[in-house]
Amino acid sequence: MSLSQSNPSESPNIANAVPRIVYGEGVDPSIVVSPEEKAESSRALGRTDEAIANSAIYLDPKPRLLNKGTHYPNWLGRRRFSSVPELQDVKGDIVRISTVMRDKHLKPVPRSAELMNKTSVHEDVHAAQAERNDRNVKIGWGIISAATLAGATMGHNAGDGRGALTRGVMTASGAFVGYMAGYRVAPHERQARKTAGQVLSGKAEVTTRAITRKS
């Protein structure tokens, strides 16, 4: 069972808008999230108080290989986390933040507060994009879909005559390479990385210290 910093039975207080913070079962107890500081960075990105009050942040304890965080629209987030009761009555978007990643040897490695905060801003950019119906999201997903299809087609063609299993593996590999290429150039993703400082310069447009680790 997850732990929440707000009472799921209470209606969101729009005047004092803060997101619901939900800690997944097994999350490192040293991790603490300030709802007030998270709300402050969300406002800096243009999110409305109503959207903030209806949203939730889920701290995910599951070790991930690539995915540091995800922004979910409400219906998909509740379905994705159907086993987390504290998220089932959330009325707005849900943002998942990975607290543990796997290294190149697949060993689980706890993430620093700094990295989790950058992920938090990145995913909040996507929440803000969704709230204002940013056309870059549609353009970006169009690019990602086209690149994924092109990669899958190239992989499939390269696997012709090599057996069904090999062709299937090459098709899947091509699709993955295409997806990653599309992800790198999609305008909504580029905006999120730039805003969060997940670029070579490391300079962020919006920062937050909402997530900390107690010593």
Image: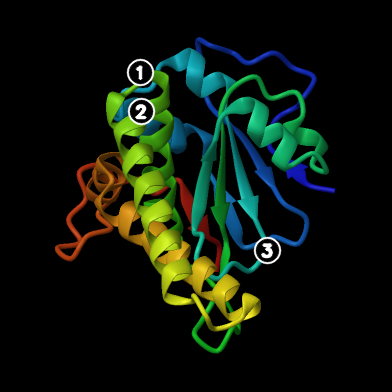
Q: CA distance from mark 3 to mark 1?
A: 31 Å
Residue at the location (74% across, 17% down)?
10
Residue under pointer 2:
129
Residue contact between numbered discs 1 and 2, judged by CB atoms under 8 Å: yes
Q: CA distance from mark 1 to mark 2?
A: 5 Å
Q: Position of residue 212 (x, y in %)?
A: 49, 56
Furthest-left residue in this view = 201
Residue under pointer 3:
62
Give the image quarter of residue 113. bottom left
User: Is residue 129 placed above or below 2 in the rendered structure?
Assistant: above
Badge 3 marks a residue whose secondary structure is: loop
Q: Position of residue 182 (x, y in %)?
A: 32, 53
Q: Which mark is residue 132?
A: 1
Disc 3 residue crowd, few under 14, some 14–19, many 20+, Cα 10 Å:
some
* First reached walking from the N terminus: tag 3 or tag 2: 3
Side (left or right) of 146 relative to 111? left
Quarter of the image with the C terminus in it: bottom right
Residue at the location (55% across, 89% down)?
105
The amino acid on which the numbered mark 1 sits, given as a three-letter code, is: Arg
The amino acid on which the numbered mark 2 sits, given as a three-letter code, is: Gln
Side (left or right) of 5 relative to 182? right
Badge 2 marks a residue whose secondary structure is: helix
Side (left or right) of 33 relative to 187? right
Q: Position of residue 134 (x, y in %)?
A: 31, 24
Please name whichever residue, 200 or 215, is drawn nearer the observer in this view of the structure. Answer: 200
